[in-house]
C-alpha cells in the first residue's frame, strides 16, 4: 500500500490546529450526547469493567447511580454493578471527556463545544471544585448535594449566560491563558479567571436573582479548575478534527481509567491500544504518599494530545515544582516534547521560547524511536473511593501502547515483512 | 510521644506548590515525623484533620492564612523546624544550569539550522540508520563508526550521490573541512593543497608533512577504507575529486589510499585527470598499470606525496581559479555542444571531456567517444569538427567562412536541452579578417533568443592568436566578451569550464554535484556519538550541537526495521 505518512500527519495536525472550538452552551447528557441512554454511564479512559475498576472509578460509579436515583444506597449500587445491570462506555466513544473518573450519567448537565471550522461537537461534565468530589470517587451526601445544585441551579444560569454572550471561544482563551502562566492541564488558574470574568456580566443578567448570581460567580471564581472541563472539551473537539486521516500516525486520544492507559491513532480508526497505567510521581498533600495513590486516571490527557498541558510546561514554570524541578526543567520538558511531535502549534505559543508554538500532534513513530513518552501533568487520586485528590505530579504513558499501535499501523498499511 | 506545633501566618499567600515543597522540606528535617503546610481553607483543614495535624490554632485559621503544622518527636525538634520555615521558603534550587540536549538529529537541526555536517560515531549497527536520517535532512556525513554493513555503505553513498551530499566513511577517522579537523585530525595550516584519502593515518601523515614543509591544506576529505573496493566503486573518492576540482582554493590535489581494486583505480585516475589540476597519487603498495600522464604524478610514499604536492604548488600559475555557477540555467538544460573549426582543438576537447561527461558524441574518431550518425545533428554532448570534409564540400573552411558555424550556432541554441556552447576562434594570416564582427553578434543573438525562451545559454569561446595578428587578439577577445561570451585564451581551461558545467547539469552523470557551500561556510555540525568529537570541534571554534542519542526503539530490531520503512514516507 502506498501511503505518505508525512503528508497524512501534516494534514491531521493542520486540522487539529485549525479547529476552532467554541463553548456554545450546556445541555443534559441524555439529550445532547450521541448514544447516551438510561442505564449507561460514561467514564474516563479506555473501556473498563466494574471488576477491573479501581477505587476512584468505583466510587464515582456508585455516586452516579445514587445521583440518578438508580440505587438507593452504596450496597445496592455495588450489587447492580456486580449483576451487570449498568453499561459502562468510554466518554471518548461518545465525543465526550471527563477529568479523573470522568463518570457522566444521563441526567448530568454537560458543556457543549462546537468546532466552528469542521462542525464536530464535543462534551464534558462540569467541574466540582476541590476536596471531596465525584471525579475522585467521593459520593457522600455533600458531594451529591453539590452535584444537584450544579445541575439544577448553576447549569441553567451558565447555559443562558453563554447563549446570551453568543458563545465563548475556548481556543482564544487557551492561547491567552498560556501567556498568563497556565499550561491548561494542571494549572488553569488564569484560564479560570478569564472564564469567570467573561461570564460574570452575563450571569448577572440571566440569573433569576442576585443570590444565585452571587453563588454561581463565587463558585466559578473560587475554583481554579472551573475552566478545565470546557478546555478539555475544546481539546477533544480539536483532536477529533485530526482523527480518521488515512495513513496518519498522529495520536488523537490519550486517556486513562485508573487501570489501563489507552490511546487511539488518527489512521487506525476507533481501535484502542491499552496497557496498565503507572502511578504518577509528584508532590503529595500532607499525610499522603505514593503508597496511597491510585493508578493514573482521567481524560484530561486530551490536553497533551492537543499540544498543551505537560507539553506547554515552559509556559507554566510556577508549577514545575510538582516534580521538584526548576523553571529550566519546565523549559526542557517542552523542548523534549518537540522530539515526538509533528508540528509547532500555530496558535498556542510560549513567550519564553520566543513565542514558539507548543509541540503538537504526537507521532507514534517518534515515540517508539526515541523512547520518549509524552509528558503528562496530572492530579493524583487516593486509591480508596471518596478520599479525593492527594497530590499532583507527572506521569508518562506505558511505552507498550505506542509499540502496539506502531505494529498495528505497520500491519494495516503493509509495512510488515 | 509525638508533639504537634503549628504556626499561623495571616494573609501570607503562597502558591500551593511552594507550600507542598515546604512541607516536604520540613518532613526531611531531623526529628520531624510529619508536616502540613496549607492555606487555611475548610477543605485543607479537613485534610489536616484526616492525618491528625489539625491543631486548635489551625482550626481557627482563615482561608487567607498560611497554616504550618509540624509533628515531631520532641518539642525542640518541632520548634526548630518551625524556626526554619523562612529559610526554607527562601531557598532556591541552585542546580547547575544544564543546557537542553536534543534527543534526535531532527530536533538538533532546529537548534543549529546552519549545520551542513553530521558526525556519527554511534555503534555500527545503529550508524547506518543515523546516517540515513542525516541524508534525509540534507546533511553531509562524517561516519566514524565501523562495523557498518557493506550494503549499507553502498546504499548510503548512492543516496548521497542523488542528493549532492558526501558520505565520508564508514570507518572514516579523519577529515579537515574548511580548516576544522574532524575526528582525529592534526592542526594544520590552511593552504592550496586538497586531499582525498581512503586511509586515516595516511591522511594525517600527509597533511602534517605538508604543514611541516610550509604549505597547507584547503580541504582533506576522508572516504573510509572500503571506498576504493570494487563494490563501493570509489563513490566518495570520485565525489571528493569533483569537489576539489571545482574548489577555487585547491590548486594541487593529493589522492591517498590503500591498494584499490584495479578497475576502480583506473576510474579514479580518469577522474583525477579530468580535474585539470596537478594530482599526486599514492596508492600505498600499488602501482597503476597506466603510466602517469599529463597532470598526474605518482608518489610511492606518503612523504613523497607531500613533497611533490608542495613542489607542484610552486609551479601552478596564479591565474584566477575557475568557479562554476549553474543557478541561471532552466530545468532540462544540460548538454554541451562544441562547434570547432580546428581539428586538433576538437580532439583535445574530446580528451578532456570523455573523462567528465557520459554520452559524448563526435564526428571525429576517438576511443571511448560515440560517433554521430549524422554530423549535421548533435546528440546529447557533442563535439563537432566543422572543418571535416563533409562540411566543406562546395564552401570555404570555417576558419575563413563563418556562415556554417553561425547557422549551427542558432540550431544548437534553439535546442532547449542545450546549456553550453563551446567554440574556437583561430586568428592569423589566411583566417577570416575579423571573425568577431560576424560571430560575436551571432553569439549575442543566440543568447538573447534563449533568454526570450526562459533559458540561459553559456557560450564559451577560446581565441587562438596573438596581439600582433591582423585581427588583433585583444580586440577579438573584447568583442566576444562584450557579446556575453565567456572568453578564454587557454583552451583546456575553456573545455574544463564548459565540461564541469555540463557535468553538474546532466542527471545522466548519476551524481548531483556536491555544493561547495558546505566547504566554505563557517563549519557547523551536529555530533551523534563520542562527545570528545564535539569538544574538539568547539575547541576549534566551530558551532556544534551534541545529540543525546539512544538506540532507536530501545534497540528492538523488529521495531527498528519497521521504523526505518516508515520514515520519510
Image: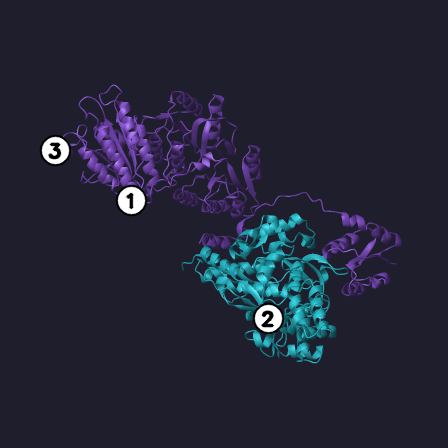
Chain colours: A cyan, B purple
In front: label 2 or label 1: 2
Q: Is residue B253 left or right of residue A102?
A: left
Q: Position of residue A44 (x, y in %)?
A: 61, 68
Q: Are marks 2 and 1 in contact (CB under 8 Å)?
A: no
**Front-most of residues A217 and B283:** A217
Q: Earlier in the sequence, mark 1 or mark 3?
A: 3
Quadrant in the picture for residue B399: top left
**Above or below, comparing residue A286 to residue B269 in the picture:** below
Mark 1 residue crowding within 10 angstroms, few (<14) / some (14–19) / many (20+): few
Q: What separation in Å lies between label 1 and label 3 (alpha carbons)?
A: 34 Å
Look at mark 2 in the image and give the residue it sits on. Answer: A163
Q: What separation in Å lies between label 2 and label 1 (alpha carbons)?
A: 62 Å
Q: Is residue B352 left or right of residue B131?
A: left
Q: What separation in Å lies between label 2 and label 3 (alpha carbons)?
A: 95 Å
Look at mark 1 in the image and give the residue it sits on. Answer: B453
Quadrant in the picture for residue A75: bottom right
Look at mark 3 in the image and give the residue it sits on. Answer: B393
Q: Secondary structure at mark 1?
A: loop
- Does mark 1 fall on the same chain as mark 2? no
Amino acid at each position: 500500500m502506498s501511503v505518505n505518512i508525512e503528508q497524512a500527519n501534516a494534514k491531521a495536525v493542520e486540522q487539529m490546529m485549525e479547529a476552532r472550538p467554541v463553548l456554545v452552551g450546556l445541555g443534559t447528557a441524555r439529550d445532547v450526547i450521541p448514544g447516551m441512554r438510561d442505564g449507561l454511564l460514561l467514564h474516563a479512559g479506555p473501556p473498563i469493567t466494574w471488576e477491573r475498576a479501581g477505587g476512584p472509578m468505583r466510587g464515582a460509579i456508585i455516586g452516579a447511580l445514587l445521583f440518578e436515583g438508580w440505587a438507593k444506597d452504596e450496597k445496592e449500587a455495588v450489587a447492580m454493578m456486580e449483576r451487570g445491570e449498568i453499561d459502562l462506555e468510554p466518554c471518548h466513544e461518545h465525543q465526550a471527556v471527563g477529568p479523573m473518573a470522568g463518570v457522566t450519567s444521563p441526567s448530568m448537565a454537560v458543556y457543549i463545544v462546537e468546532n466552528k471550522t469542521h462542525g464536530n461537537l464535543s462534551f464534558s461534565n462540569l467541574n466540582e471544585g476541590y476536596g471531596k468530589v465525584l471525579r475522585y470517587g467521593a459520593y457522600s451526601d455533600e458531594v451529591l448535594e453539590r452535584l444537584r445544585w450544579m445541575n439544577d441551579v448553576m447549569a441553567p444560569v451558565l447555559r443562558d449566560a453563554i447563549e446570551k454572550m453568543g458563545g465563548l471561544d475556548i481556543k482564544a482563551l487557551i492561547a491567552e491563558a498560556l501567556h498568563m502562566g497556565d499550561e491548561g492541564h494542571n494549572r488553569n488558574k488564569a484560564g479560570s479567571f478569564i472564564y469567570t470574568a467573561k461570564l460574570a456580566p452575563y450571569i448577572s443578567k440571566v440569573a433569576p436573582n442576585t443570590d444565585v448570581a452571587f453563588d454561581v460567580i463565587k463558585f466559578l471564581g473560587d475554583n481554579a479548575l472551573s475552566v478545565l472541563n470546557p478546555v478539555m472539551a475544546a481539546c477533544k473537539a480539536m483532536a477529533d478534527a485530526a482523527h480518521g486521516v488515512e495513513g496518519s500516525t498522529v495520536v488523537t486520544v490519550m486517556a486513562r481509567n485508573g487501570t489501563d492507559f489507552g490511546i487511539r491513532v488518527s489512521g487506525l480508526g476507533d481501535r484502542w491500544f491499552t496497557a496498565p497505567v503507572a502511578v504518577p510521581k509528584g508532590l503529595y498533600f500532607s499525610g499522603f504518599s505514593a503508597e496511597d495513590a491510585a493508578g493514573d486516571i482521567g481524560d484530561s490527557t486530551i490536553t497533551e494530545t492537543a499540544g498543551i498541558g505537560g507539553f506547554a510546561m515552559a509556559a507554566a514554570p510556577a508549577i514545575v515544582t510538582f516534580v521538584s524541578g526548576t523553571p529550566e526543567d519546565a523549559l526542557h520538558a517542552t523542548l523534549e516534547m518537540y522530539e515526538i511531535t509533528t508540528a509547532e502549534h500555530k496558535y498556542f505559543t510560549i513567550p519564553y521560547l520566543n513565542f514558539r508554538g507548543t509541540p503538537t500532534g504526537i507521532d507514534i513513530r517518534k515515540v517508539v524511536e526515541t523512547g520518549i513518552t509524552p509528558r503528562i501533568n496530572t492530579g493524583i487520586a487516593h486509591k480508596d473511593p471518596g478520599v479525593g485528590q492527594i497530590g499532583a505530579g507527572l506521569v508518562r504513558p506505558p511505552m507498550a501502547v505506542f509499540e502496539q499501535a506502531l505494529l498495528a499501523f505497520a500491519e494495516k498499511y503493509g509495512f510488515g515483512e | 510521644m509525638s508533639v504537634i506545633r503549628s504556626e499561623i501566618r495571616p494573609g501570607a499567600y503562597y502558591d500551593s506548590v511552594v507550600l507542598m515543597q515546604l512541607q516536604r522540606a520540613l518532613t526531611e528535617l531531623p526529628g520531624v515525623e510529619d508536616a502540613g503546610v496549607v492555606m487555611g481553607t475548610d477543605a485543607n483543614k479537613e485534610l489536616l484533620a484526616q492525618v491528625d495535624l489539625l491543631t486548635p490554632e489551625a482550626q481557627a485559621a482563615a482561608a487567607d492564612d498560611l497554616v504550618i503544622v509540624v509533628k515531631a518527636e520532641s518539642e525542640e525538634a518541632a520548634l526548630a523546624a518551625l524556626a526554619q520555615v523562612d529559610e526554607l521558603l527562601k531557598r532556591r534550587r541552585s542546580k547547575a544550569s544544564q543546557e537542553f540536549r536534543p534527543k534526535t538529529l531532527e530536533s538538533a537541526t532546529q537548534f543549529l539550522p546552519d549545520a551542513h555536517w553530521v558526525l556519527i560515531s554511534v555503534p555500527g549497527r545503529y550508524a547506518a540508520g543515523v546516517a540515513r536520517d542525516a541524508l534525509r535532512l540534507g546533511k553531509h556525513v562524517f561516519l566514524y563508526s565501523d562495523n557498518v554493513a557493506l550494503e549499507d555503505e553502498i546504499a548510503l553513498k548512492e543516496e548521497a550521490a542523488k542528493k549532492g551530499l558526501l558520505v565520508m566513511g564508514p570507518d572514516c577517522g579523519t577529515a579537515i573541512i574548511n580548516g576544522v579537523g574532524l575526528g582525529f585530525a592534526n592542526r594544520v595550516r590552511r593552504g592550496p593543497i586538497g586531499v582525498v584519502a581512503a586511509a586515516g593515518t595516511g591522511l594525517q601523515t600527509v597533511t602534517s608533512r605538508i604543514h611541516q614543509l610550509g604549505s597547507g591544506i584547503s580541504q582533506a576529505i576522508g572516504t573510509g577504507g572500503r571506498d576504493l573496493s570494487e563494490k563501493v566503486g570509489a563513490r566518495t573518492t570520485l565525489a571528493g575529486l569533483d569537489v576539489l576540482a571545482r574548489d577555487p582554493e585547491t590548486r594541487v590535489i593529493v589522492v591517498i589510499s590503500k591498494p584499490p581494486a584495479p578497475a576502480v583505480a583506473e576510474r579514479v585516475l580518469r577522474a583525477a585527470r579530468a580535474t585539470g589540476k596537478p594530482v599526486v597519487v599514492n596508492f600505498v603498495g600499488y602501482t597503476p598499470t597506466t603510466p602517469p600522464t599529463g597532470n598526474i604524478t605518482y608518489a610511492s610514499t606518503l612523504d613523497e606525496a607531500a613533497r611533490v604536492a608542495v613542489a607542484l604548488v610552486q609551479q601552478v600559475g596564479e591565474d584566477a581559479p575557475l568557479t562554476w555557477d549553474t543557478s541561471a540555467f532552466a530545468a532540462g538544460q544540460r548538454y554541451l555542444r562544441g562547434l570547432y573549426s580546428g581539428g586538433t582543438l576538437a580532439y583535445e576537447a574530446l580528451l578532456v571531456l570523455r573523462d567528465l561527461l557520459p554520452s559524448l558524441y563526435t564526428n571525429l574518431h576517438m576511443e571511448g567517444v560515440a560517433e554521430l550518425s549524422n554530423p549535421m545533428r548533435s546528440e546529447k554532448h557533442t563535439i563537432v569538427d566543422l572543418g571535416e570534409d563533409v562540411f566543406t564540400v562546395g564552401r570555404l573552411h570555417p576558419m575563413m567562412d563563418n556562415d556554417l558555424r553561425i547557422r549551427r550556432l542558432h540550431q544548437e541554441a534553439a535546442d532547449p536541452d542545450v546549456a553550453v556552447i563551446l567554440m574556437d576562434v583561430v586568428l592569423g594570416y589566411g583566417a577570416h579578417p575579423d571573425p568577431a564582427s560576424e560571430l560575436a553578434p551571432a553569439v549575442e543573438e543566440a543568447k538573447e533568443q534563449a533568454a526570450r525562451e526562459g533559458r540561459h545559454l553559456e557560450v564559451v569561446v577560446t581565441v587562438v592568436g596573438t596581439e600582433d595578428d591582423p585581427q588583433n587578439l585583444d580586440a577579438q577577445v573584447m568583442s566576444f566578451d562584450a557579446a556575453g561570451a565567456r572568453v578564454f585564451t587557454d583552451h583546456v581551461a575553456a573545455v574544463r569550464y564548459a565540461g564541469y558545467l555540463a557535468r553538474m547539469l546532466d542527471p545522466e552523470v548519476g551524481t548531483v554535484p556536491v555544493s561547495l557551500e558546505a566547504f566554505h561556510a563557517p563549519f557547523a555540525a551536529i555530533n551523534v556519538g563520542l562527545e570528545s568529537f564535539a569538544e574538539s570541534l568547539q575547541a576549534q571554534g566551530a558551532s556544534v550541537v551534541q545529540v543525546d542519542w539512544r538506540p532507536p526503539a530501545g534497540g528492538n530490531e523488529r521495531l527498528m526495521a519497521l521504523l526505518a520503512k516508515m520514515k520519510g514516507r
